[in-house]
Image: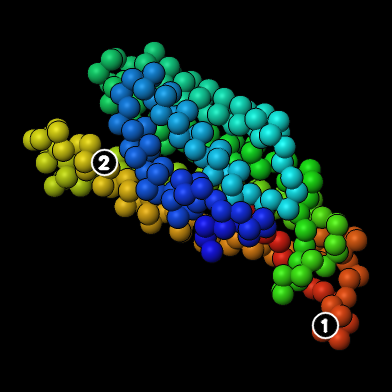
Amino acid sequence: SAALHPDTGDTIPRPFRMSGYVPYNGPICVAMVASQSTPTLLFWSWVNQSQNALINYYNRNASSEMTNATFAKSYAAAVGSALAVAFGLATLIQRRYSPAQAKNLLKWVAFPSAVVASSLNCYIVRSPEIDSGVPLVNSNGDDVLPNETSKIAAERGVNSTTLSRALLQAPVYFLPPVLMGAIPLVKNALLRNPAMRVPVTTYLLLVCFGIGLPASVAIFPQMGEIKVEDAEEKYHKLQDEKNGGKPYEVLFYNKGL
């Protein structure tokens, strides 16, 4: 079930499940897009990346233990880098443009800062998996080499998850402002009634988020596969005893979400 972690069987808290990403993270994204000052943008960037760090933690490959100290260091590095990106872009805009122009441009800071920050967040929080490696299993889910792990598969899993996080930011932070400025009907309605900007932004962002999340996750399925020849040498000559002793050609691993 989506509520249970495939490695540990533990229940994932509702706000940190993939099924809870849109309803819990959506309002935070709206607040980021609607931010018109640097302190406000930094606050919501911190909230956003804190939740992202916990989503990455709870949906990682948990076959190897991650200590609280390791997670704390990863969290600090991930959120710190996110705030640095948001602050740097916001400061650059405010220095180069007039207050009125800067106020209008700040809504675009959320997109590039979220791409960089979410990617860094995911990679940093999940990077301990690369050091420890992940188990490889056959098509039945049986561990083909008990007590052994593949760092090559772990690196592929972390990299593909990081890329999916980066791709997710486009429909969430880029499309809503573009649609609000490019569709004449919407643009003119907002000019006549500025109070509609927040509800329209909320609606478009949640719709784009709801479409973009399953699409970005589907690009890289949770169970990744790796050719035996691409894995470490210790996996090269393993045989499938349940299939007449034939050598394995492809093995699988939980890349996380």
Q: Amino acid at mark 1?
A: Lys
Q: Nearer the viewer, mark 1 or mark 2?
A: 1
Judging from the image, what secondary structure is the residue with disc 1 in?
helix
**Residue behind mark 1:** 242
Judging from the image, what secondary structure is the residue with disc 2 in?
helix
Against 141, residue 185 (above or below) is above
Q: Amino acid at mark 2?
A: Thr
Instruction: Say left or right for 231 vs 168.
Output: right
Q: Is residue 210 visible?
A: yes
**Residue behind mark 2:** 201
Label disc, if present, on residue 224 of the rendered structure: none
Q: Quadrant of residue 72?
A: top right
At which x and y percent is residue 64?
Answer: 75, 48
User: In the image, what residue occupies the spot 64% across and 63% down?
Assistant: 223
Q: CA distance from mark 1 to mark 2?
A: 55 Å
Against 252, residue 200 (above or below) is above
User: In the image, what residue occupies the spot 68% across and 34% down?
Assistant: 68
Which corner quadrant holds the N terminus?
bottom right
Against 239, residue 221 (above or below) is above
At which x and y percent is residue 153?
Answer: 74, 55
At which x and y percent is residue 164?
Answer: 54, 50
User: In the image, what residue occupies the spot 74% across and 45% down?
Assistant: 65
Who comes first in sequence, dot 1 or dot 2? 2
Against 39, residue 163 (above or below) is below
